[in-house]
Amino acid sequence: MRADGVVIVGAGHAAGTLAAGLRQGGYTAPIRLIGAEPLPPYQRPPLSKAWLKGEADPAGLLLRPATFYAEHDIDLRLSTRVAGIDRAAARVHLENGEALPYEHLVLATGSKLRRLAVPGIDSDGIFELRTEADAQALRARLGPGVRLAVVGGGYIGLEVAATARGLGAEVVVIEREHRLLARVASQALSAFFADFHRAKGVTLMLAASVTGFATTAGKVSGVMLASGETIACDVALVGIGALANDALALDAGLDCRDGVVVDEHAVTSDPAIFAIGDCTQRPMPRYGRSVRLESVPNALEQARQVVARLCGKPMPAAEAPWFWSEQYDLRLQIAGLSLDVAKTVVRGDPASARFAVFHLDADNRLQALEAVNSPAEFAAARQWVSARQVIDPARAADTALPVKQIIESVPGVA
Ligand SMILES: Cc1cc2nc3c(=O)[nH]c(=O)nc-3n(C[C@H](O)[C@H](O)[C@H](O)COP(=O)(O)OP(=O)(O)OC[C@H]3O[C@@H](n4cnc5c(N)ncnc54)[C@H](O)[C@@H]3O)c2cc1C
């Protein structure tokens, strides 16, 4: 092993997990972890949930205590940005002019928020939510009676809407599509969340396109819509999705296609360079295509692949992708990806806020499952999705059958 060791670009969820995993796996060469943010690696999911509500301890956000890195001989450099990669010399260049040599380089640069390019977007009171600093700024402005306009009815927008209602804010969600979660959830789930948010007092404006922000003395006072309507607000959150942070990889000539293209072991088109987490376009053999995922389980899985490779350990078994979201007292868990879906089957009554949606392909194999407050269905589905299990739609819908018995009469297909 060369003394240059590994340089990890980004110090987020994937990177922090990787650095710790490498030391636990017996990696003894230098580890340099370079992060643009001022905080040691932390979790983002609480930023729109418990942490935004003020229910979580700030230190609880960190993946490991701040002292962990020095104690494990990990050179963690915060508030430091990598400006470029010189592949021929196997070095990265930092914005401060320093150059760091590497034997292996890992890109863990995450994703960047999609910007809404409309007049007034830079006014005071308009927020986005990606970092702890973003969450601090937003939290300082939420409270009883505050009028919050959320632009974007995706997971982050809806989680913030739920949290803000919990803090007593008046909330309007403005979504361009005809339903919430249009890109990422089934019709049944979208309809359920729309009803639930409305019942909690959130106003939903669907098929509504934002054209700009009205301001008073530089401060946001409303969201202007293509319909000509202006929705009055004191604070606005824009959550309209994210893009891969792959500029460094592109500049370095690595293969990129909506993310840094990697193989099943997180290796990029340069064998000395890995990429992990939100910034990657990764193969998903279960679905016969490549995808870019923005989820913690994906970041952790790819970090484990790099640990295995650099520590000479067996490659971990591939796992079905999964995701979760929390809104009010609802816990949504999703196993698999809703690709090539021929039919959906709802198990349970959405009105009870406890149900699951099975997504089956043309051969009735389980492609994905969305589970609301249904952990048993979710746990079973993670196995079934991986096993390409055939599901009898009638048995799936029959809530008199315990979850495990749904598949009793139908063999799995390898
Ligand atoms: C508000 C919010 C809620 C979420 N909720 C959930 C959830 O409930 N469930 C779930 O599974 N996922 C959730 N996610 C997504 C999840 O947090 C991400 O998938 C995960 O953080 C990805 O990890 P990562 O390491 O790839 O990227 P990140 O954690 O984003 O880390 C990337 C880091 O790289 C740094 N960086 C980028 N470029 C450079 C550079 N040139 N030099 C140095 N540093 C650089 C960035 O500043 C950043 O700190 C949520 C995300 C957000 C924002």
Image: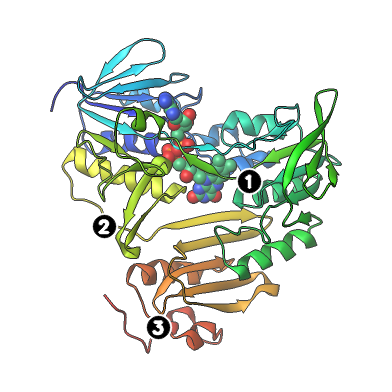
Which mark is drawn over residue 90? none
Q: Quadrant of the N terminus?
A: top left
Q: Is residue 24 left or right of residue 120?
A: left
Residue contact at pointers 2 and 1, CB within 8 angstroms = no
Disc on the earlier residue, 2 or 1: 1
Position in image of residue 159 (x %, y %): 65, 49
Residue that mark 3 sits on: 407
- Mark with earlier residue (3, 2): 2
Above or below — where is 129 with respect to 293?
above
Q: Is mark 1 within 8 Å of ligand 1?
A: yes
Q: The residue under label 2 is which amino acid type?
A: Ala
Mark before the other along the chain sequence, 1 or 3 = 1
Q: Residue at horizontal 14%, vertical 24%?
A: 2
* Residue at (55% x, 32% y) in the render: 59
Quarter of the image that includes the C terminus: bottom left
Nearest the viewer among 400 and 9 is: 9
Instruction: Name the residue tied to disc 2.
Output: 317
Which residue lies under the disc numbered 1? 49
